[in-house]
Image (cartoon, rainbow, N blue to C red):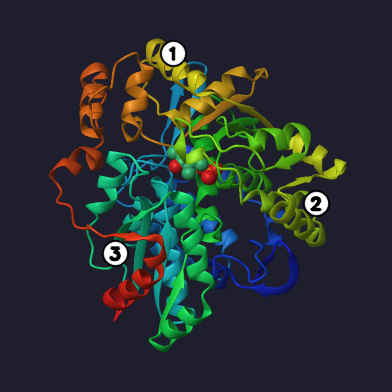
Amino acid sequence: MPRLYHSTRSNEHSVTSKQAILDGIASDGGLYISDSLLDLTINLEDACRRDYHGLARLILEALLPDFSPEEIARCVGAAYGPQFDTPAITPLVPVGDDWMLELWHGPTCAFKDVALQMLPQLMSCAREELSPATKIMIVTATSGDTGKAALEGFAQLPDMGVAVFYPHEGVSDIQRLQMVTQQGNNVSVCGIRGNFDDAQTEVKHIFADEKLAQRLHAKRLALSSANSINVGRLVPQVVYYFAAYKQLCEHRAIKLGDPVEFCVPTGNFGNVLAGYYAKQLGLPISRLIVASNINDVLVDLILSGVYNRLRSFNKSLSPSMDILVSSNLERLLYYLSDGDTTLVAKLMDRLERKGSYTLPSSLRSRVQELFCAGRATDEETQATIKQVWEHHHQLIDTHTAVALHVLQKQKRTQGVARVCLSTANPYKFPAAVLEALGQSSEGLDGFGCMHALQAYTHSPIPHPLAELHNLSVRHHDIVERTDMSSYVEASAERLLS
Ligand SMILES: *Cc1c(COP(=O)(O)O)cnc(C)c1O
């Protein structure tokens, strides 16, 4: 009897994990979850003897039971190969008395790679089994990091294509160049005249357009999404919590079985939710610390039990965490309410219609038993970058700095090792990091900032960012928001017919 997935908002309809990965989101708007998470256990001793590939196979086989071990092994081999610049995939490094888990050694230098190198492999495998005659077009709106990671993940996969929309004037120089130089004959990249929300809203309309779906269906084409609520993005992130634990043991910072705390720079709640999954699977995590920037809706939720998205949206120095609706939180509410789909549906409905909800007090207490939270302003973020550079000679990016600031403010528990997740290479945000170190970025473009930062710190520019200079621009398209739908249709036909 295969263990199945169903919606957080109803348990009437169950699907295999392959189907859940192809669907992305459940048909009632809920997220796919599996109740088997609550009775699965990973053997810690076994886990700590494995390399990253071995660990990934162990966790993926447990959480995606309808994939065969051979399929999983193939996906793991393809996802975590030489496109990562270290075989450790997610190396652990000391920072003072604490540790940082570096999640940015993949092809786009941000943590999204760990999931977005794997999701396309899983999706491709699921497509071959469940709908081999249909080709799939991935459509994604990006504020910067996700777009490039999706392009890298899906480029060159047979019978799949990917279209990425970014706000023409809303991403950094480096982020834009990363996307418009993308190679591969199944990719299209397009700027839109509008902001990220415009792009995101229009992508949702495209997915809801039944006439478009029918026209594509007639040509044996279907649309899908690489959004972070996909089970196929969540599950691969569970692996590195175990990888961190194993490395702590190797460094003799802990003994097998000792408790550990993780502090996670949080936006859509995918990364930290994977930590909760790791804990459910038996990893001895005593606390998960949610770190927010000034968009601190999750900090308020955890401290007060009230989620309120009706507040001003602030642009911060850590843009990948500028978010007011953290979609993956819905999965946590499902598990912590003991699978109360009616309650979850009611809270999500309130959030959508009224803009806020309040957790019942029992649920609030359970959230507070497991999680604590803190925030960092832009000034605190910059001060942390400077302090870590001056005291430890380590260069960190703005997102990591938010988490490290929050971690440093927490009271230390004697004998508990602490790990801060590091989510981007500092050269992805070179202007902000340069300024934080007290150096001016005035008059410098993205490359200028990268080189000034390298001259000042002698820290190496990662290869995929350094080589951007030599790549030619392959994608020139810019469209109005209203033309996105026809752009997707034309791209699907051009790339996949
Ligand atoms: C996406 C992202 C985050 C936020 O992760 P979530 O899973 O959305 O909480 C943090 N840092 C960086 C650099 C990111 O790209």
Q: Amino acid at mark 3?
A: Val
> Where is 424 relative to 58, above or below?
above
Q: Position of residue 144 (x, y in %)?
A: 39, 46
Of badges 3 and 1, nearer the viewer stands: 3
Mark 2 → mark 3, Cα distance in angstroms = 41 Å
Dot 3 or dot 1, earlier in sequence: 3
Secondary structure of the residue carrying numbered label 2:
loop
Query: Which numbered circle lies on residue 171?
Result: none
Determine which quarter of the picture holds residue 37: bottom right
Residue 175 x/y as whole percent = 31, 43
Q: Measuring 36% from the left and 34% from the top, which residue is drawn there?
A: 425
Name above or below for residue 152 compared with residue 357: below
Q: Residue at x 38, y 11 (%)?
A: 390
Q: Decide which of tag 2 and tag 3 comes sooner along the chain.
A: 3
- Is 320 rendered above or below residue 118? above
The residue at the point 45 percent across, 68 percent down is: 123
| Mark 1 element type | helix
- Residue labelled with disc 1: 387
Residue bearing mark 3: 187
Q: Amino acid at mark 2?
A: Ser
User: Would residue 468 be seen by someone viewing this image from the given angle?
Assistant: yes
Sort mark 2 into few (<14), some (14-19) or many (20+) by Cα contacts within 10 Å. Answer: some
Residue reaching furthest to the right: 361
Return the residue at label 2.
337
The spot of residue 346 in percent (x, y) is 79, 58
Q: Give the class, few, some or many, for how many residues have Cα within 10 Å of label 1's Cα (few <14, many ≥20).
A: some
Quadrant of the rendered image containing residue 78: bottom left
- Would residue 485 appear left or right of 373 to someone viewing this image? left
User: Looking at the picture, does residue 488 appear above or below residue 374?
Assistant: below
